[in-house]
Structures are given as C-alpha cells and as structure tokens.
Amino acid sequence: MLKGVPPFITADLLWIMASMGHGDELAIVDRNFSGFRVATQTTSGKLLILEGVDAPTAVRGILQMMPLDTFSETPLMHMEAVDAPGELLEVHKDVLAICREAEVRKIESRPVERFAYYPIAMRSFAVVQTAESRAYGNFILKKGVV
C-alpha cells in the first residue's frame, strides 16, 4: 500500500499511468463494455478491472495522479447516447464535474458517437473497466504533462 493512493488504484494501473506519455489516452469504460476485446488492440494490450468502483470514482482517483492534457481543447471524451445525441447524461455530468474540479479549469467533454468510440478506445494506451452501471458510462482521458 502506498500513501495518498486510493485503495482501488492497482499496481497495474499505476504502471499504466506511469508508462503513458503526454497525449496518450486512457479508456475508462462501464461494466457492459467489451473491455477484453477492445483492450487487446490497445498500446499496452491491458484490461484493468476496478471491481466495485463506478466511473466517477475511478476518474477521481486517476486524476489524483495523472493530469489531463492542456494542449487539447477536449482532453475528455464520452460515448454519447444513441437515443439522445448531444445530450450530457448524469454519468457524463458527474465525470465532467470531477475533471473540472481536479484540473481547476474549464474542461468540456467531446461527445463521440457510440460506434466511433470503439476505434478510439482501441487506439488508447489501455482500458480500465469500472463497475459503472449507468448506460454510456464510457470515457477517454488524454494525459497531460506533470
């Protein structure tokens, strides 16, 4: 156990975040997402599972150690709902608020159409699967510079 590290942040997740470079992306996905299939296509080939942790809690813990990119207009992306394109669902609002709080700056989340999200997740560094039960609780975080 390390001081200051949330207990659900695993050694593998610490390694992933430390191995990522500026501009690399991390997919944070809900419990219904095809995590294993997509993770095999990522840079690391890793699927990290955070049992019992919802998406906002996972993002809060990750952002305690990893900054979001300041060079990108949208260092946060979310999978938009098929039946409500352009609408921010509660899970999206929750994660967006956490990102703004962690970064102490205005951040917007770029909506990504459901099927366009999969190739973006496949190009990410790794996939972190949460226990998020709300639909469309899938995000992409772009790493910044410490």
Image (cartoon, rainbow, N blue to C red):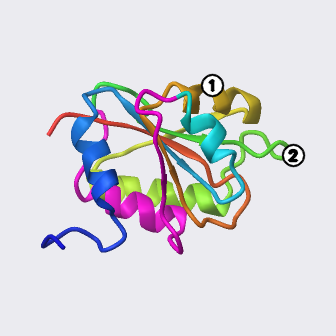
Residue in front for this viewpoint, 99 or 37: 37
Residue in front for this viewpoint, 4 or 110: 4
Three-letter residue code for mark 2: Asp
Give the position of the C terminus as an image quadrant: top left
Q: Position of residue 57 (x, y in %)?
A: 44, 68
Callout 2 environment at 10 Å: few (<14), some (14 to 19), or many (20+)? few
Q: Position of residue 71 (x, y in %)?
A: 29, 25
Task: Residue under label 1, please give it.
Answer: 119
- Residue at 83% in and 42% down: 82
Give above or below for 22 relative to 79.
above
Three-letter residue code for mark 1: Pro
Check residue 72 for magenta coloring: no
Highlighted range, magenta: 42-69
Residue in front for this viewpoint, 8 or 86: 8
Check residue 60 for magenta coloring: yes
Q: Is residue 37 left or right of residue 18?
A: right
Q: Position of residue 61 (x, y in %)?
A: 33, 63
Q: Are marks 2 and 1 in contact (CB under 8 Å)?
A: no
Q: Position of residue 59 (x, y in %)?
A: 41, 58
Earlier-in-chain disc, 2 versus 1: 2
